[in-house]
Amino acid sequence: MALRIEYAHPLRAFDANVDLTVERGETVALVGPSGAGKTTTLRVVAGLLRPRQGRVSVDDETWLDTAAGIDRAPEQRRVGYLFQEHALFPHLDVSQNIRFGAPRGTSVTDLLERFRITPLARARVRELSGGERQRVALARALARRPETLLLDEPLSALDAHTKASVRAELHELLRELGLPTILVTHDFEDAAALADRIGVIVDGRVVQEGAAPDLVSRPLDAFVASLTGASLLRGIARANGSGLTEVVLDDGSSAWSTHEASGRVGLVVYPWEVTLGRDVTDDSSMNHFTGVVTSIVPVGNRARVRVGDLVAEISAVSLGRLDLREGDTIVSSFKATAARLVPLA
Amino acid sequence: MALIILFGTPAAYWIATRGSRLRDLLVTAVELPLVLPPAVAGIGLLAAFGRLGLLGGTIEALGIDIAFTKVAVVLAVTFVASPFYLRTAVAAFESIDPTLPAAARTLGAGPGRVFGRVALPLAAGGLGAGAALAFARGIGEFGATIMFAGSLQGRTQTLSLAIYEQFDLDFDVALAISAVLVVVSGGVLLSVKLLTRWRSGSSTPIPFAPSTRMST
């Protein structure tokens, strides 16, 4: 079972032009800034938006073909659509919500049990927490026995505490279901955790597509790099006799990279490749920048430390050992091999 | 009243789900009786349905006489009161979060089922309020009725018309009818308030109430 989408549709500032195939059991995440056409893609698949031109098919069943004049109504396409704010019916209780889309003979009791919401069966929607709403919405979407799953920002309505556990549950569920799934998110980390493949969508176009590690190691442009969490330094690259590329950064300092490039470039470096020290160390790192710590954000057993334009991710233990405080002057270092170069427009 | 609700509800839903330009045009048409002086409405109805009116000849040929009959009262009241219901109903349908009907569609509900099981219950509070307004306006209808249906006792005399007539004859009777109307109107208003409160208590989310129980 594969879901094939191909459509062109004018949006406010640009034309969305998406061509995407999602295999059975595969989850593809569409990541990008808001208004890039992510939700538009889901609406086209669900039949809530008729694109100016396009095709949508699941296996050999065609749901939409503007050229052939085929356009199935949303209720005749078997999609499980998880809306951003869940779109639960406020006038119905939990089990009525789930029963709404269920074909005759569906056991709502089983679904309630499966999503561990049996005690909430009679509860009204507004009495539910974010995580509970999420589970009810998923149960309702699955009661329809969909052939494809569309998830619109499934984790954005949750607080950070609930998010981690819901993400794990969702990952488990997606694997179990084995449906072609499109997931829309603006969070690269969520996409990397849930999806097999990530499509970065900007201004209505998929600019880069691949597994999460590929996007991290070979970002095609500055946007993809920043999306994956990298720091970006801007400058002019020129080849240096030593086989390295020298990048004269906009603030006048120089950085070194083993990647080849020339002209205006972005120097991409990931937080986990940046080390921090009180003094310039005599190690293999070629790039050292002295700067002031502007923020320290603890993330579990790690901390993200912002020094000028760079972000370093260090362990909580190292943070304690260095006794870092905001406002301290510190040296951040990274190797020339860790400095990826991407062309800047 | 039943006429207004029966035809007004689907019409309002239809208007509420149209594109913006067509919607504006329709709403304007619906609101016309609101701004029309009742006397003009009465003349208009006479001109349309009266014995010498535009459609009068056709209707008369069918053996039906409308002007100065009970049907005329119903027509006049409907004409004048329906905008109150329609306006509120359109607003009630438009205030429904558009993702809810969309979600219902993706869950396999056709347009009819979306209307019956999602739009109607969600708009019920607004529809009730609109019906009460229309009822209140209809019960007090005077101008258009007296022009189009006259004030024939036992046939086309409404309570409001009776008050006017009794005002000249017997002030006490006029007062008594007025008292009845006060009670009826008050009762309608009260029952609508109770109905909307009961509904919001059981289903519709109350604004400003915490919508999620956040575990912190």
Image (tube, coloured by chain):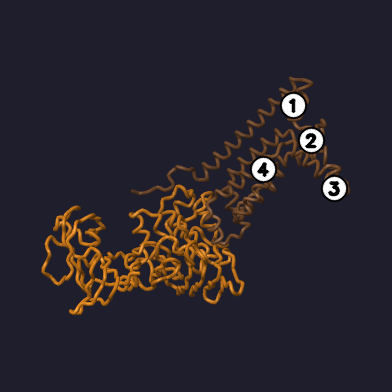
Chain colours: A orange, B brown
The residue where tag 4 is placed is B83
* SS at badge 2: helix
Q: CA distance from mark 4 to mark 1?
A: 25 Å
Q: Earlier in the sequence, mark 4 or mark 1?
A: 4
- Chain letter for mark 4, please: B
Dots 4 and 3 on the same chain: yes
Give the x, y percent position of residue B13: 63, 51
Q: Which residue occupies the foreground of this view, A299 or A79?
A: A299
Q: Earlier in the sequence, mark 2 or mark 1?
A: 2
The residue where tag 3 is placed is B59
Q: Residue at x 61, y 60 (%)?
A: B110
In the figure, is residue A246 to the left or right of B166?
left
The three-letter code of the residue at mark 2 reads: Met
In the figure, is residue A146 to the left or right of B188?
left
Q: CA distance from mark 4 to mark 3?
A: 25 Å
The residue where tag 2 is placed is B147
Residue A303 appears in the rendering: no
Q: Earlier in the sequence, mark 4 or mark 2?
A: 4
Q: CA distance from mark 4 to mark 2?
A: 20 Å
Q: Earlier in the sequence, mark 1 or mark 3?
A: 3
The residue where tag 1 is placed is B163
- Chain letter for mark 3, please: B
* SS at badge 4: helix
**Tag in front: 2 or 3:** 2
**Tag in front: 2 or 1:** 2
* SS at badge 1: helix
The three-letter code of the residue at mark 4 reads: Pro
Give the x, y percent position of residue A49: 54, 63
The three-letter code of the residue at mark 1 reads: Ile
Q: How many marks?
A: 4
